[in-house]
Amino acid sequence: MKTVDSIVIKHGELRAPTNVSGSVIGPVSLSASELIGLRNARAMFDELRSLLSDAVLPAIGGARHPVSVRLTTLLGEIHIQSAGFLAQHWREADRFAEAKEVANVDHRNH
């Protein structure tokens, strides 16, 4: 899988519901390795959520147990506050890289 070298998040582009007031102070550039790190963090988060849902929560009393409710709430908040680990941005970078590959195909041999 190929990715672009970096992606820029423009002022006000990243919005997630939050109780904190403030504003984005300027564009942020993410390198390809940072985008890969976010993708990996998302994969690990999804694995953690599955383990908790499939094994831990049932073992401590099910979905209605107060600890289960709190864990589920925290996982949801992490996902919201991280904007899905910036999934929109690394997916866009993937689409850009795929389009770039298609554009670079030598059509003379086809």
Image: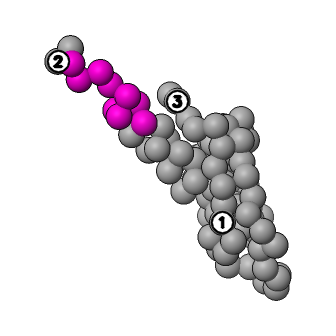
Left or right, residue 19 beside residue 93? right
Nearer to me, 44 or 1: 1
Bounds of the magenta segment: 100-108
Sort mark 1 into few (<14), some (14-19) or many (20+) by Cα contacts within 10 Å.
Answer: few
Q: Nearer the viewer, mark 2 or mark 3?
A: 2
Residue flagged by tag 1: what amino acid is it? Lys
Question: Does dot 3 land on a helix, a strand or a loop?
Answer: loop
Residue 15 appears at what percent x and percent y? 65, 73
Residue at point 52%, 30% (across, down): 2
| In-front residue for pair 65/18 | 18
Whether residue 51 can be seen here: no
Whether residue 66 is situated above or below residue 8 in the rendered picture = below
The circle on residue 2 is 3
**Which of these two is toward me, 72 or 16?**
16
User: Residue at label 2?
Assistant: 110
Task: Please name the residue shown 46% across and 44% down the image.
Answer: 96
Q: Quadrant of residue 38?
A: top right
Q: CA distance from mark 2 to mark 3?
A: 23 Å
Q: Earlier in the sequence, mark 2 or mark 3?
A: 3
Separation (CA) of disc 1 from disc 3: 23 Å
How packed mark 2 is, by other alpha carbons closer than 10 Å (few <14, some 14-19, many 20 or more), is few
Q: Residue at x 72, y 48 (%)?
A: 30
- Quadrant in which residue 25 is drawn: bottom right
**Disc 1 marks which residue?**
10
- Between marks 1 and 3 in the image, the one whose residue lies nearer the viewer: 1
Q: Amino acid at mark 3?
A: Lys
User: Label 1 to label 2, Cα distance in Å?
Assistant: 40 Å
